[in-house]
Amino acid sequence: MITAKVECDMDKFKEYRESHPDENPTESGGLSETQTNTFNYSLIDKIKIENVFGKNLQNYENEKILSILEFEKRFFEFRLKVFLITNSREIISHDDFVSPIVEKQDPENFTDEQIKQQIEEVIEEQEKVLKKAKERTATINSVEEAVEFLINEDLDQTKLDEIKNKSLVTRFDNCGEHFGYNMYLRNVFIYPNKNQIFLENLRNYNSHYVTEMGEFGEGIIEDLLWRKVNNCETTKDNSNKIEKIQKQIKEGLEFDSYWNLTIKMKLLSYNLNDNEIESYLKLENMEENDKDNFDEYYYQKKALLARLNEKDRQTFERLKRDYFNVQKVINKLKQKP
């Protein structure tokens, strides 16, 4: 059991209410739900852990307490991430995070031979699809043609909707799709593709500024696919700005300047405006120089890329506070002697 007290007397509460006017009070004059939540979250910094009953923190029971809190931390972190990387602003529930997806078919209802047969049928079907795609792509001569094929012939509506739901935040995820959809693109378009016209076009592709090219250039195809589906091809004006920066880089720069310009080119390629780029680079600098608040700047950058409206911004702040709050509680417990 953990006992704690909150250092907030009535005078401090009145001071808070006066400095944070409630725009939508209840009929009885009480705090609205939004203001109540804001007030509750503001109390986290006032929490002082007084005692922990039972064994000390190094023993099993307390490790178990911490493991539960660590699990909650992972949930809040994942929920925040999913909200930011989806254009639908998906908010997963605790049950969805805890409960694994259960297959409709229970393996216990099948014999080993039946399971083996099902696996073989799936593999055979996948090989047929891949063979058909490769036969078609043998005549594709450019990255643009490859993407048109994917959109108009290869991908079903479910997959297209999935790509359309990926926010701009995913374009700045270094892990990308290397072991996911990009692997399929490698198998279809790159090896053992012997169409030298296409391979040459892929090697020399420069229509968009791309940093995550993948192992064999499949990242270029995936990036253009996302741009096409999400209507985010680089404008001519921004392409010109990128070209000027590239010339500037060739003249020689210090590392910090080079890094900032590299980020700026990527932001320009996804059509962020000057104010957004300035704000992003400022957050990048604060993230680098203020390690104590690294997470705050990190998620503010993500929120900027997600281009949240006012309502979504409020939701983002709430989800972020949930994650940060459990972090703070864990840190306080770990600091308890």
Image: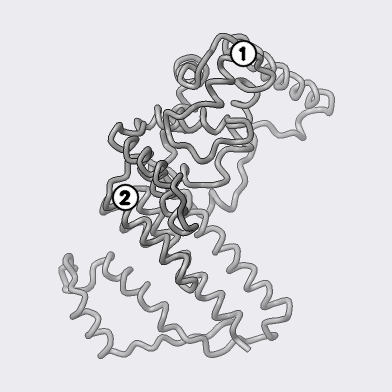
x then y, percent, for residue 83: 43, 49
- Picture coordinates of residue 134, whole percent (x, y): 62, 14
Q: Nearer the viewer, residue 101 or 7?
A: 7
- Say if 285 sits above or below 248 in the image: below
**Pointer 1 local density, CA inside 10 Å: few below 14, some 14–19, many at least 20:** some
Depth check: give the residue in front, 220 or 177: 220
Residue 312 horizontal/vertical position (percent): 32, 52
- CB under 8 Å between callouts 1 and 2? no
Q: Which amino acid is tagged 2? A: Leu
Foreground mark, 1 or 2, reads 1
Quarter where residue 299 is shown: bottom left
Please say if 278 is above or below 138: below
To which residue does mark 2 refer?
Answer: 308
Rendering coords of residue 232 (x, y %)? 36, 33
**207 sits to left or right of 142:** left
Residue 177 shown left or right of residue 275 in the figure: right
Q: Residue at x 63, y 15 (%)?
A: 129
Q: Mark 1 or mark 2, which has the lower sequence index?
A: 1
Q: Is residue 321 visible?
A: no
Given the image, on which type of amino acid does mark 1 rest?
Asn
What's the CA distance linking mark 1 and mark 2? Answer: 43 Å
The quarter of the image holding the C terminus is bottom right
User: Looking at the image, is 129 positioned above or below residue 300?
Assistant: above
Please name the residue shown 67% across and 20% down the image: 126
Task: Report the residue marked by disc 1.
Answer: 195
Left/right placement of residue 106 relative to residue 39 reads right
